[in-house]
Image (tube, rainbow, N blue to C red):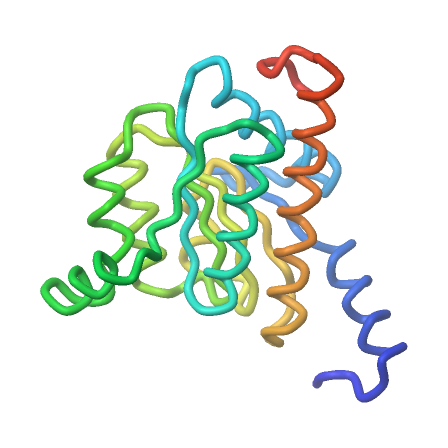
Amino acid sequence: MQERTADSYLQKLSELMLSTQVTGKEGDFYSLEEGADIAVRMVLERIPSSGKIMLVGNGGSAAVVSHVQNDLCKAVGVRGLVFTEQPLLTAFANDEGYGSVFEAPINLWAEARDLLITVSSSGNSENIVRSVEAAVAKGCDVITFSGFAPDNRSRSMGNLNFYVGSDVYGYVETAHAALTHYITDRARSIVLDGEDPGRSP
């Protein structure tokens, strides 16, 4: 149930954000701090390798990944791609179905050792799941952000998976936005400090 006052809403949001669960590909658990550090390292590893970071999401999550792409490119200096350019997206959706709209461009653009970041409140959207499958087939690393059901499909598909335990869109989307903002802010500070991008934060 969503909270009825600003104080209680923000209190609940804070609790959910701090209780975000982070798991690896084999189901191993990390603390939020450990998981965030690994995510920062995964972002920074693209700098010496000239790798790309591809980002996908639907609706509000599409807005989140567009913001992350902006920060990766401008603040961190990493090549970031989103696949929400309307003519191409609608062409794939019209001709091949909406489930293909991220999978198809990933098949075109992804190279081994690129990174895919997926942001999905449910973690079960067909186009999100297919994007992960396509990226893995290309040899990419994957970070997922999800919420809603704890057994959602994308939560177990990434090398690193962040899960927010709520079924309220506002909570899940805001938590994802804050977590991804932390990752890009931390990556930027490491770059500005002249630390080795390939070294663990």
- Count of numbered badges drawn on the protein: 0
Residue 53 located left or right of residue 44 = left
Residue 146 located left or right of residue 1 = left
Q: Quadrant of residue 126?
A: bottom left
Q: Nearer the viewer, residue 193 or 7?
A: 193
Residue farthest to the left, as pictured: 95
Q: Nearer the viewer, residue 79 or 108?
A: 79
Q: What residue lies at 50% left-to-right and 19% top-to-bottom?
A: 47
Residue farthest to the right, as pictured: 7
Image height of 7 relative to 143, above or below: below
Q: Quadrant of residue 41?
A: top right
> Where is residue 164 shown, x and y percent of the image?
63, 60
> Where is residue 33 shown, x and y percent of the image?
75, 37
Image height of 8 relative to 83, above or below: below
Residue 144 located left or right of residue 94 = right
> Where is residue 178 shown, x and y percent of the image?
69, 53
Q: What residue lies at 59% left-to-right and 49% top-to-bottom?
A: 162
Image height of 11 relative to 156, above or below: below
Quadrant the N terminus occupies: bottom right
Q: What residue lies at 17% left-to-right and 67% top-to-bottom?
A: 97
Q: What residue lies at 55% left-to-right and 36% top-to-bottom?
A: 72
> Where is residue 82 shown, x and y percent of the image?
39, 48
Q: Quadrant of residue 195?
A: top right
Q: Nearer the viewer, residue 71 or 42?
A: 71
Quadrant the C terminus occupies: top right
